[in-house]
Amino acid sequence: MSEVLLRARFRLRGARARHLVLAVRVVAGGTIAAFALSTPGFMSSLSINALLNAISLIGCVAIGMTFITLTGNIMSLCLGATVSASALIFLASLSFGVFAAFLIALLFGVAITAVQGFLVGSIRANPILVSIAGLSLLIGGAALITGGQRIYPSGEGLQMFKGRAAGVPVEALYFFATVVIGQIILSYTRIGREMTMVGSNLRAATAAGIGTTSAITYAYVIAGACSAVSGVLLAARYGSGDMELGAGYDYIAIAAVLVGGTSIQGGSGSVLRTLVGVTVIAIIEVVLLLRGFSQQLQYLITGIIVLLVIMLHTIGERR
Amino acid sequence: MQFATKLLIEPNKRPFTIMAAVVIVLALMDQGEGYFFSLGTVFSVMQLFATFGLVALGLGLSMLVREFDLSVAGIVGLAGCIAVITGASSPWLGVLFGVGAGVVSGVIQGLIMTRLHLSSVGVTLGGLLTLQGLTYVLTENKTIGYPNIAVALGLNAPIGGLVSVRSVAALAVFVIAALAMTYTHIGRDIIATGSDRRASRVAGLKTDRVIIGVFAASGASAALAGVLLSYSLGAASPVALADVLPTAAAASIVGGVSVVGGRGSPLGIAAGVLTLCILRSGLSAIGVEPHVHDLVTGAILLAIAVLDAPELLQRVTAWRLDRAERKA
């Protein structure tokens, strides 16, 4: 198979290449859509709701991860822990009222990642190393403060972040709001454009006089805020929390980012692509579930499809 | 003073400096009570070393060639399950199949990366998810017990109160890796590929083969860790060790492996793993709260991240000039 792909790559140059890659993507997307629509019960409100629930929580983290990947900093292994920690902060500060608690959780998430972003941006510290340091500090700090106990809500107001409004799960509304805000920041603000430039060529961006430190720091700030939103939604859904809540989210999030087609090298990607990535993964899972595949086969098939899609994208973007 | 800075900054010496510092600080905290310097602590350090060491070695090798093998976390689980399933009658058969699976997975991913010129993070992330899926399928989403309890007991039985068969096996692999890296051309090839791949290729080195070989070795090493762990627990479960990847990465980096490739050694990685294991067992031996070691590990990693940052010096110089200017 690799021979065929290799030859295909040599033939693909320039605009024609882009058209062909686009065609392959459309065909792949069409196949998934056809599979989904031909699955009995996929269009039922039950499965649509399951789909929305599945993409909302992980989706927020994936949106945040997009900004880190886009600025050329590969991925963060600390976002899952940030999700858990902000969920704990949110639950613990509910006694100040739900809005205050939401704000505190948001500020906390932002503070955690802002420090990391500043280190990465200002002195070019290695992003993966910094994120592992952050992960250790968060896990250790949380265990020290909570003593490993579960945290229960200290006040009322969780209903704001769960249940449904106008027939749609509330989580999905928060998620779509995050998508819209994220994409607006990325395409219509100066800092958003600077992030893309920093990711595509750091030295050129520096030479052009772009504040690379602030662009990267802001990317991490957004990642922290998105993770905190996910943490608040998780806390509301489960009604209590510990540091296991968001464990493993980092990997699913980066998978969604890459499946969406954001380049791992940075400089090319968008929030909307990640929305597509999260949705594709969720659709595959729901379809497999509806078609009666066992849980274990679902994991395997999803893994293989993620691998194939990532290969497809990277072949397309290679120069 | 200059000597001390050298010990801390020179990458070949730093892992051992950090390890010595950790031992000294723990000994001071122990205040001669004898909880830290005891056979029990050494044994538990070595048991932890057996669990995390080989995974760190695998990941560290991939970092040496400037790649990042996320799939080691998946191989640990898969190889453990394969060994438990196939090794019921003969444990060696399980080792063979488990490690074989690690090699195969490494070679396949290496081929995909080199033939299609893909980055390792994407490919090994897909690999990680696929391997985890395979593990779920093989175990049918359950924990499988390993009937051969004698093997489990034998692997973990203390030898001279210091080590067990399991930790000796891990140590042996490190020694073999260190010898191969020092005395054969493999070491030079790996360092050359990691330092500058294009230059190495121009100089006639078959870098693609080096990469595939490194990923095969990385898979084998992580697989052996998984096999030994599953045997000694007497069970295999698809729910992988969640913290295995960050711990392995942290150990490699504390062990002096550069994240931008071309720098590091198996001995350094061993020192890095030992440092983290000594922290974990040592702190609990002297009765410090169990999660303080996470905080200390995090602080050490943060310090390394800052010290190794390529633009630290420029920033500090700029800041000093700025301050001098303001004074004048």
Image (cartoon, helix red, strand yellow):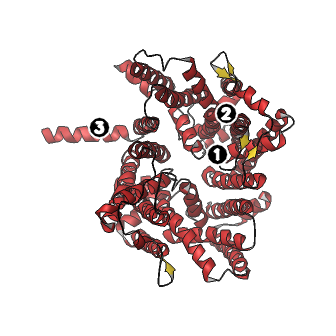
Q: Amino acid at mark 2?
A: Asp
Secondary structure of the residue carrying numbered label 2: helix
Report crowding for label 3: few under 14, some 14 to 19, many 20 or more residues within 10 A (C-alpha): few
Considering every residue shown, the one lying at the far bottom of the view is: A166
Secondary structure of the residue carrying numbered label 1: helix
Position of residue B17 relative to residue B259, above or below, is: above
Which quadrant of the view contains residue B57?
Answer: top right
Q: Chain of mark 2?
A: B
Report crowding for label 1: few under 14, some 14 to 19, many 20 or more residues within 10 A (C-alpha): many
Q: Earlier in the sequence, mark 3 or mark 1?
A: 1
Q: Which residue is mark 1?
A: B73
Which quadrant of the view contains residue B156?
Answer: top right
Give whichever of B1, A65 is nearer the camera.
A65
Q: Residue at x 51, y 53 (%)?
A: A75
Secondary structure of the residue carrying numbered label 3: helix
Give whichever of B283, B311 is nearer the camera.
B283
What numbered label is drawn on residue A219? none
Report crowding for label 2: few under 14, some 14 to 19, many 20 or more residues within 10 A (C-alpha): many
What numbered label is drawn on residue B189? 2
Q: Amino acid at mark 1?
A: Ala
Q: Amino acid at mark 3?
A: Thr
Q: Earlier in the sequence, mark 3 or mark 2?
A: 2
For the residues labelled 3 and 1, the Cα–Cα distance comes to 41 Å
Give whichever of B126, B171 is nearer the camera.
B171
Q: Which residue is mark 3?
A: B317
Q: Nearer the viewer, mark 2 or mark 1?
A: 1
For the residues labelled 2 and 1, the Cα–Cα distance comes to 26 Å
Considering every residue shown, the one lying at the far left of the view is: B328
Q: Answer whether residue A124 is visible to the viewer in this image.
A: no
Q: Chain of mark 3?
A: B
Q: Chain of mark 1?
A: B
For the residues labelled 3 and 2, the Cα–Cα distance comes to 37 Å
